[in-house]
Image (cartoon, grey):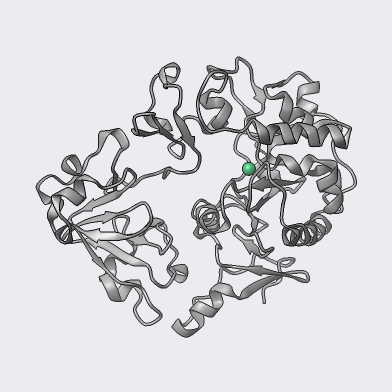
Amino acid sequence: MTGLRGKFSAPPRRLGCLALAAALFAATASLGAISVLDTYYSPRNRERPARGSTRFIILHTTEGRSRGAGAKLSRRGEAHYMIDEVGRIYRIIDQRRVAYHCGRSMWNGRTSLDNCSIGIEMAGYHNRDLTAAQYRALKDLLTEIQAIYGVPDERVLCHSMVAYGAPNQWQRRSHRGRKRCGMRFAMTSVRARLGLTAKPARDPDVTAKRLVVADPYLHRVLYSGSATEQAQAAAKYLAKETNVIGPGRSAWDIARDEYNSADTVYVLPDGTRKNGTEIVNWRAIPRGTKVLLSEGDANPPEQVRTLGTTGATPASVAGDESLSATTIYVLPDGRCLRGNTLTAEIIAAMPTGTRVLVGYKMDGPITSRRRAFDICGPCWQEADTFYLFPGGTLMSGNTVDAGRIPRGTMVLFKN
Ligand SMILES: [Zn+2]
């Protein structure tokens, strides 16, 4: 057991084959009386500096299910803890180090809050309630962390309270409303269930005119003094949420500052998909375009081409090799197929979002007896070796954590 009140805790030990599967589900650390899982312990830990101070705890919502969210948070080192739908607590970045969870942030004139805060991600959505198990787990975790760092209730904030946006084509001034992340954690009713009795009565940076309010509904959820008014504003938020661009509903309204991110995918009415980095003229996005958040891969490796983005077709990606055994097609649902098992008709009908690797061998799956090294030798941790996890996530060999590759993962490596 690793006590988190002491020095930096060691990264999880390398475990023998037999222990590996069990270890993925077993607590390997503890925080006071709380068990903490290391399933998503981030490989980024070693590169993160120690945090100088801890003035705030910032609560987030993952906007997706825990499984995908956990892998992503781990890969990028974007939180200290995540609590899944059934209340299990996962440690991602050691709580004494800096995690990048707030991005552009400000509170009472202080900026870059990652340097002075602990970030907790709750699996779920900004406009949905937590599960009862999540309430219990979060309450326990907050009690423990607040005691360790002496953080009072009024400094337990949510991401939407501290995030702010720089001026853009929709907002002329620096503004609040960049994120809706975790907004329900400002509601009096939600805080009461978490044992939090005090909260900020107003936005200090709006009061000081450093920022303007870009989202009045959100502002009411965060700061209305009446629980009824908060609930009404939150409900309205839920009702008006649609991910389709139309009159009075811009890309910014839907995606906020993720509007131009590679993670945000736009599905045009004709079926074309583009990610946020591929759109040049934001005024020309047709009505009826659907916006999918957190769908793209923020850093698509260049060896992996995705059909449907920037006009990529099987012909343009694989050319003469489209029917070759060394051209691998990874379908959006995670199935992978070699070109020589397909026909030209099937390939032409591949769904948008299919990832294609040319000049690759595919072998596996990884089992307790057959590890990455056994499959592809020393190239197992190269940037151009890829691991296809059972859920369809594709991870590069230089970011994958060898101790945490799930059984059933296939390995794709240069021929
Ligand atoms: Zn957040």
> What residue sits 30% from the left and 38% below the top?
308
**In which quadrant will I find the N terminus?**
bottom right
x, y percentage for residue 377?
27, 71
Residue 116 falls in image quadrant: top right
Of 181 and 128, the residue lying toward us: 128
> What residue sits 45% from the left and 22% below the top?
287
Check the image and report above or below for 390 versus 200: below
Find ligand 1 in the image and state its quadrant.
top right
Residue at the farthest left position: 320
Q: Decide if residue 348 is on the left or right side of residue 212.
A: left
x, y percentage for residue 221?
77, 33
x, y percentage for residue 89?
67, 63
Check the image and report above or below for 166 versus 119: above
Q: Decide if residue 173 is on the left or right side of residue 151.
A: left
Residue at the farthest bottom position: 18
x, y percentage for residue 283?
45, 16
Residue at the farthest top position: 172
Residue 399 falls in image quadrant: bottom left
**In which quadrant will I find the C terminus?**
bottom left
Of 392 and 333, the residue lying toward us: 333
Of 360 and 102, the residue lying toward us: 360
Of 414 and 388, the residue lying toward us: 388
Does residue 362 appear in this view? yes
> What residue sits 30% from the left and 46% below the top?
351
Does residue 152 appear in this view? no
Check the image and report above or below for 338 versus 364: above
- Count every numbered label the image shows and give the total: 0
